[in-house]
Image (cartoon, rainbow, N blue to C red):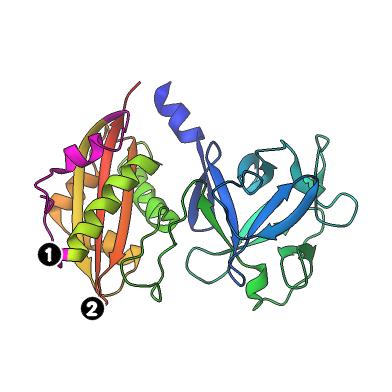
Amino acid sequence: MKKAAIILMFLVIGNSTFYAQDLYLIENVWKGTQINYDNGSLTTTVSSASSKGNVWQLIDAGGGEFRIKNVQSGYFLNIETGSLACTPIETGWHSALWRLLDANRANTFRIENKHKPAHYINNERGLACTPIQMGWLSAQWVMKPAGSNTQVITNTTNNNSTDIYHPIFLNKINEFRRTKGLNPVQWSNKLNKAAERHSKDMASNNQGGHTGSDGSSFSQRITETGYKGFGRMENVASNNSGRDEDFFTQWFNSQGHNKNMSIPEISSIGYAMVRTASGSYFATLVGGVDSN
């Protein structure tokens, strides 16, 4: 029964995997602002630590479609009256159903409405849902786990910045595990913090390995995040591309690292990549077994 529950917890959208129980910030690629609903007003704003109106939940509606729920108000994004709004909805409203479509940029998506195909959420002239030109950055969005101000890493990111969520890598490892008949793994923000800590450490010292510069082991780093479970494995690597696919391939082609990714009882992972001052990258993958 536990295995079935894990399988139902995530939804695969395009080349990425999102968790329906997790909370997200929806950030515009063009302006770096986030969709926010507060005091009856739907806007885009710069993220604030005190803001709660910019936190959203993806609700799986089946068939690759989902609803986008504002956590603070409990209302949903929709275009029932023709304009983009955040209101209570009725069951069956196609105007409140959305699809995430790959935008041909790392970790970015276009958000299309089911009721009006080819109408996308964008911030070209204020927040709206309209037809777009495919090159508009104003219609491209990044899903970021709520509660983190860390950047999504790309090949042009600043030195030593890290990200908190790698949907491409998560999808890769789950595809790999499915070919072996293993349960998929879910994303853990706490395991990610352990991976991020070690990747930063390796990048700062320009040296790989499993022992931290402070003498910590991977299991100690996991425990110190407050993760409810126990650490089971850690993979580390470096390369010059900064691509999730390349790190996955490195580990896939290494017998020991491949074996780590094939451990049956692993239920959650964290993965973080950091760019060094010289432009190379260090990455850490950790896997854990969640407590029941």
The answer to whether one can see residue 185 in this image is no
Residue that lies at the very extreme toward the front in this rendered image: 50
Q: Would residue 36 be visible to someone looking at this image?
A: yes
Q: In the visual, does 83 lie left or right of 248?
A: right
For label 1, count other residues whose C-alpha is less than 10 Å away and answer few (under 14), some (14-19) or many (20+): some
Q: Tell me the quadrant of the picture where the C terminus can be found.
A: top left
Horizontally, residue 288 falls left or right of residue 43, namely left
Q: Which residues are magenta?
A: 205-229
User: Residue 57: x and y, percent?
Assistant: 61, 42
Which three-letter amino acid code belongs to the residue tagged 1? Gln
Residue 278 shows which numbered tag?
2
Pointer 2 or 1: first along the chain: 1
Q: Amino acid at mark 2?
A: Ser
Q: Quadrant of the N terminus?
A: top left
Q: Where 277 sits versus 143, above or below?
A: below
Residue 92: x and y in percent read 81, 38
* Label 2: element kind: loop
Q: Nearer the viewer, residue 110 or 228?
A: 228
Q: Is residue 213 magenta?
A: yes
Mark on residue 207? Answer: 1
Majority secondary structure of magenta residues: loop
Give the residue at x 67% y 68%: 139
Identity of the residue drawn at 78% across and 63% down: 128
Q: Residue at x 61, y 45 (%)?
A: 55
